[in-house]
Image (cartoon, grey):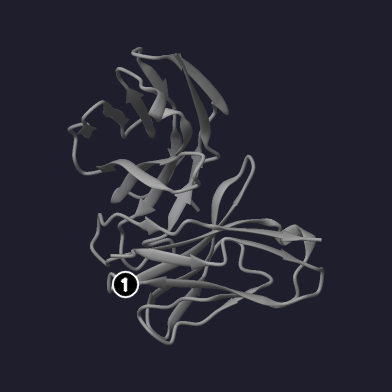
Amino acid sequence: AQTVTQSQPEMSVQEAETVTLSCTYDTSESDYYLFWYKQPPSRQMILVIRQEAYKQQNATENRFSVNFQKAAKSFSLKISDSQLGDAAMYFCAYRSASSGGTSYGKLTFGQGTILTVHP
Amino acid sequence: NAGVTQTPKFQVLKTGQSMTLQCAQDMNHEYMSWYRQDPGMGLRLIHYSVGAGITDQGEVPNGYNVSRSTTEDFPLRLLSAAPSQTSVYFCASRTRDRGAEAFFGQGTRLTVV
């Protein structure tokens, strides 16, 4: 079974600075997707960024980018120019894309990292 | 476009009571899932459906039942509530496309006393 580990329960950053959230995962599959979700105090789950394992280029969405290291099974999220609205719980998640497997299509989440942004 | 709608948003149950958490989506998504969120444990998959009439167990299925008679609805039934089922419950849906984004409802905070 796949596992996702976020080893930083809490992180903090000054407004306008850069912060990196860590995520590692364990899988024997080669075809999968990785996601970062944001959960603000409203509880709504919001997709921040996704990465397909077969794509070597790191995904980028505006101020959010990832460092995807497939061999090391690492998937960190970098937030540049942090804003007060970035304060939230962030979840890393894995989803198999190998059809036929028992875990196909099912999201496996990490424990979450609470990000605080200081003005 | 309402997206994924969960009801109720909050619920308090007594131990042993049963109830159904409702989930409806209006995006014609094939895949629907139920997760529970507990502190320090992230979200864990309870049950899963790839289409009407097809369901599958997730990581933590005990104490919960599901059925999917329509594409739009995927209710989660608690058969006999226990304090260990105190949690926040999320319903999610997506298309069957490989990299499709999962859309989540607003969650239901359930307390079992």
Q: From this view, report whether residue A83 is shown above or below residue A70.
A: above
Q: From this view, report whether residue A56 is shown above or below residue A102.
A: above
Viewer-proximal residue, B89 or A104? B89
Where does the image place residue B95, in percent across and percent down from the top left? 27, 66
Where does the image place residue B110, in percent across and percent down from the top left? 66, 60
Tally of numbered discs? 1
Tag 1: residue type? Asp
In the figure, is residue A36 to the left or right of A41? Answer: left
Image quadrant occupied by the C terminus of chain B: bottom right
Q: Is residue B44 visible?
A: yes
Q: Is residue A28 visible?
A: no
In the figure, is residue A99 to the left or right of B81? Answer: left
Residue depicted at 45% across the width and 28% down the height: A87
In the figure, is residue B78 to the left or right of B105? Answer: right
Residue depicted at 37% across the width and 46% down the height: A46
Viewer-proximal residue, B51 or A102? B51
Image quadrant occupied by the N terminus of chain B: bottom left
Residue depicted at 31% across the width and 34% down the height: A70
Residue depicted at 33% across the width and 24% down the height: A78
- Residue that badge 1 annotates: B26
Where does the image place residue B21, in percent across and percent down from the top left? 57, 71
Q: Give the letter of the chain under mark 1.
A: B
Tell me the crowding category of disc 1: few under 14, some 14 to 19, or many 20 or more residues within 10 angstroms, Cα based.
some
Q: For the residue labelled by badge 1, is the local secondary structure a helix, a strand or a loop? A: loop
The quarter of the displayed image where residue A79 is located: top left
Where does the image place residue B5, in percent across and percent down from the top left? 43, 66
Viewer-proximal residue, A86 or A32? A86
